[in-house]
Image (spheres, rainbow, N blue to C red):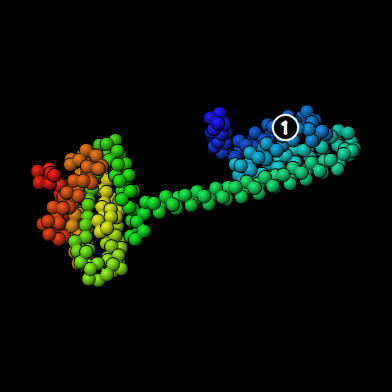
Amino acid sequence: MREVAAVTIKWVSMVESLKKIPYRYWLIISFCIAVPIAREKFFPNVFIDEIWNLYIIPVIIFSYYDGFRGAILSGALCNMIFIFTQIKDIVANKKLPGELGQIFSFLLVIAGISMSIGYLTEKLRDKERRLKALNERLMELALIDPLTGLYNRRYIQQRLNDEISRADRKGSLVSFLMIDGDNFKEINDTMGHLKGDEELQHLAETLQSSVRQSDIVARYGGDEFCVILPDTDKKAAREVAARLCEACRDSRLSISIGYASYPEDAENGDELVKIADLALLEAKKEGKNRVVSFSKNKNAP
């Protein structure tokens, strides 16, 4: 079983390598395969295994690389070389070959097989494309919050670690905002959950439109949101947080924000989230529509 698996992996790897070869090189390969056959005048015995394989192999390779078009071009190339050799024999012998039926049969068989291989390959590639699109869609759904259309908690945890790794390589900073709706429960209790959902959607739109394109906004859970600010120090993070609070000040759902920066306040992504959350708790204690930064002396657990 292990040997079969090893062979399968080897063949898959080889096929993936073949797909990276430019199309024009496959033309050269096909000519290199076909021309020696023509020079040796093997074509009168067109159905011997060696010749048959040398014609079909380029057709299969082209069809896999370029689908139906590749199969047709490869089959046409094979037939053109075959016709050329027959014309050469006619000119040399000054008479038509005796086995015209066999010649036309060969041309038709190669054309038919080329079209069949191309058609089947296109169907296979179409299924592969649809499966790939479906997988991408499923992956997207796994990382997107269905209510707000923002990224979800799973994505933000992964992305935050990536941004911290990038900051380490570049010697830059990363700031993180933890955001919470001030009166979300009151809206739900008095106006209903549908209205609460509308307010969350409106808040998501406000947050997304109030930050840079390079910043990452996500719904952390419930009425909690967060923002990753790449290449942003603590002073700039406070300015962003204040701008977000101001944008939501006149809304039914105002917000409070706790923020912290890496590597000033934390050693990794999990710690950065934790201490920004502690700063948010402090903001909630102080009142609504507040911005509070993390302080090791003030916010230490």
Q: Looking at the figure, which quarter contains the C terminus?
A: top left
Q: Please, is residue 122 above or below residue 82 in the view?
A: below
Residue 132 vs residue 217, the one in the foreground? 132
Quarter of the image where one finds residue 225? bottom left
What is the x, y in percent for residue 65? Answer: 60, 41
Amino acid marked by disc 1: Val
- Which residue does the image show at 20% across and 66% down from the upper left? 186
Specify whether 1 is left or right of 94: left
Residue 96 vs residue 58, the one in the foreground? 58
Residue 71 vs residue 192, the one in the foreground? 192
Q: Residue furthest bottom?
A: 191
Q: Please, is residue 265 above or below residue 40 in the view?
A: below
Label 1: element kind: helix
What is the x, y in percent for residue 280? Answer: 17, 52
Specify whether 224 is left or right of 287: right
Q: Looking at the figure, which quarter contains the N terminus?
A: top right
What is the tally of numbered marks visible in this picture? 1
Quarter of the image where one finds residue 37? top right
What is the x, y in percent for residue 58? Answer: 67, 37
Q: Residue furthest front?
A: 1
Visible in this render: residue 259?
Answer: no
What is the x, y in percent for residue 112? Answer: 73, 46
Q: Residue furthest left?
A: 297
Visible in this render: residue 257?
Answer: yes
- Which residue does the image show at 75% across and 32% down from the upper left? 49
Query: Crowdedness of circle 1 by 10 Å Cα count: few (<14), some, many (20+)?
Result: some
Specify whether 147 is left or right of 86: left
- Which residue does the image show at 10% across and 57% down from the upper left? 286
Query: What residue is pinned by disc 1?
Result: 35
